Amino acid sequence: MSITAKIHLGGKEFEFPTTEGSEGEKAIEISSLRSKTGYITLDEGYGNTGSCCSAITYIDGDKGILRYRGYPIEELAEKSSFIEVSFLLIYGHLPSRDELRRFSDLLTQNQVLHENMKHHFEGFPQDSHPMAMLSAMINASSCFYPGLMGSANRERFDIHAARLISQVRTIAAFSYRKSRGLPITYPKPAYKYTPNFLHMMFSEPYAEYEPKVEVLRALDLIFLLHADHEQNCSTSTVRMVASSQANLFASAAAGVCALWGPLHGGANQAVIEMLNEIHASGDDGRRFIEEAKDKNSGKRLMGFGHRVYRNYDPRARIIKKACDALFKALHITDPLLEIAQRLEEAALNDSYFVERKLYPNVDFYSGIIMRAIGIPTEMFTVLFAIGRMPGWIANFKEIIEDPKSRINRPRQIYVGPTVQSYVPMEERGK
Ligand code: CMC
């Protein structure tokens, strides 16, 4: 039986259809609300607004569930790889052996940047943030592939998607090398995705970087855990830009910009900066917890809290375990890890965080792993972007393949001055 929602306004009753997702999520369809009633909905920050129907990722924030195309994140983290998950997100099913080989070959064939793009790196100041370089360079890539505008074409979409996944990693590594005044290291076709990234980051012309297997596993896991997260700020941005029929590279570059902020992907950098600050001040974490609870301090416990999860972020649980395993395997310690563990314990037992259901999120421990691998702090959010690329591409594909897709264009409630008459300069006072 179809359920309808009734709204009473000004003595009249209006009916609206409802819809239900495959996991039982319910929504009232209000696309005719304004034309029927003259009202719109107002939901600042979109906490209650469904912007689309999507078949890519499912989250139940109360239960701490995350699934890509129906597969639990815990199972994918244990059994799959970033590249297999990328295929899964974009094409909707786990690849056969042949499909995975073809996808992997396409990534390899498209990993090298157009040689002229190298010159663009010269124009950035040495201390540029790599996120700025990443978004600029992804956008600049559009200029080198004129076929991009026809990206709805299936064959070209596959190539552009592979190009983007592969080249975001090449651009990221080049940005890092440039920012350190180091010579650029080209990708090696024989290497798989994650080892190739570490090779481009850390190999020198005179010395090949040889990563430990535990490091490769940890980094691949980080990419996999970041690969998609339904309608977060950056993915919504990608969909917004894609809805105007902008090309894939332009949409992804916008996603990078949205990801950069410290309330979103930039939190992984902010967590390490916070832990460093706590460490340098000799605080054991208790003072910082008090500051984070004080709204006037301007501080937050970075890596804690989430718009959707009102329970432990399942990615954080997996990353925390991986972090312990990596430190054990490499026989290393880090004072920042000890501070993070103390902060987590204190927050989980503090009524402020408990009442607001604030738990560690994906960013709380990921930075500590990246630090252990030798990734510099300013590259943390770039690694998030590399991981998130397949999710953005999958969302872009959903938009361009939807025959009902319309340009995204929210409304507003105007609260500025009502009509005024122009005042000539001489009558305006000082
Ligand atoms: N530390 C201290 N207080 C917090 C925190 C925090 N990390 N997060 C939320 N609160 C408080 C907030 O002050 C508010 O208190 P009150 O109800 O008394 O006004 C309450 O909890 C609800 O917070 P909110 O800001 O309304 O929640 P939101 O859903 O708008 O924001 C968030 C979610 C992730 C932006 C926020 O929790 C936050 O700023 N966390 C720190 C930054 C961070 O770790 N971001 C990464 C998110 S996960 C990865 C990703 O998506 O990129």
Image (tube, rainbow, N blue to C red):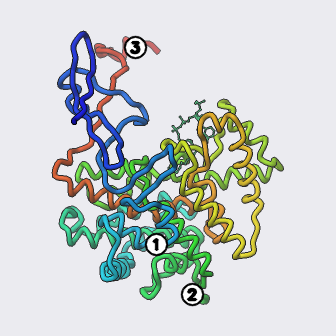
Which residue carries the number 3 mark? 428
Residue 419 quadrant: top left
Mark number for residue 205? 2
Label 2 residue near ligand 1, CB within 8 Å: no
Q: Are marks 3 and 1 in contact (CB under 8 Å)?
A: no
Question: Which of the marked residues, 3 or 2, is nearer the chain's N terminus?
Answer: 2
Residue 268 image offset from top left, x and y in percent: 59, 55
Measured in 3D between alpha carbons, the distance from the residue under mark 3 to the one under mark 1, in whole angstroms, is 68 Å
Question: How far apart are the two marked residues, 1 and 2, measured between alpha carbons?
Answer: 33 Å
Amino acid under disc 1: Ser
Ranked by sequence position, the earlier of labels 3 and 1 is: 1
Residue 418, disc = none
* Image spot of residue 155 (x, y percent): 20, 72
Look at label 2 and name its amino acid. Pro
Q: Residue at x 60, y 55 (%)?
A: 269
Is disc 2 surrounded by few (<14), some (14 to 19) or many (20+) residues within 10 Å?
A: few
Q: Position of residue 239 (x, y in %)?
A: 32, 50
Crowding near pointer 1: few (<14 within 10 Å), some, many (20+)? some
362, 267: nearer the viewer = 362
In this figure, which residue is indicated by the disc labeled 1? Answer: 80
Q: How many angstroms separate mark 3 from mark 2 (CA)?
A: 67 Å
Circle 1 — which element?
loop
Query: Are discs 3 and 2 less than 8 Å apart at CB?
Result: no
Q: Nearer the viewer, mark 3 or mark 2?
A: 2
Counting residues from the start of the chain, the first of labels 1 and 2 encountered is: 1
Which amino acid does the dot numbered 3 rest on?
A: Arg
Instruction: Check the picture and name the quadrant holding the N terminus.
Output: top left
**Residue 393 is drawn in which quadrant?**
bottom left
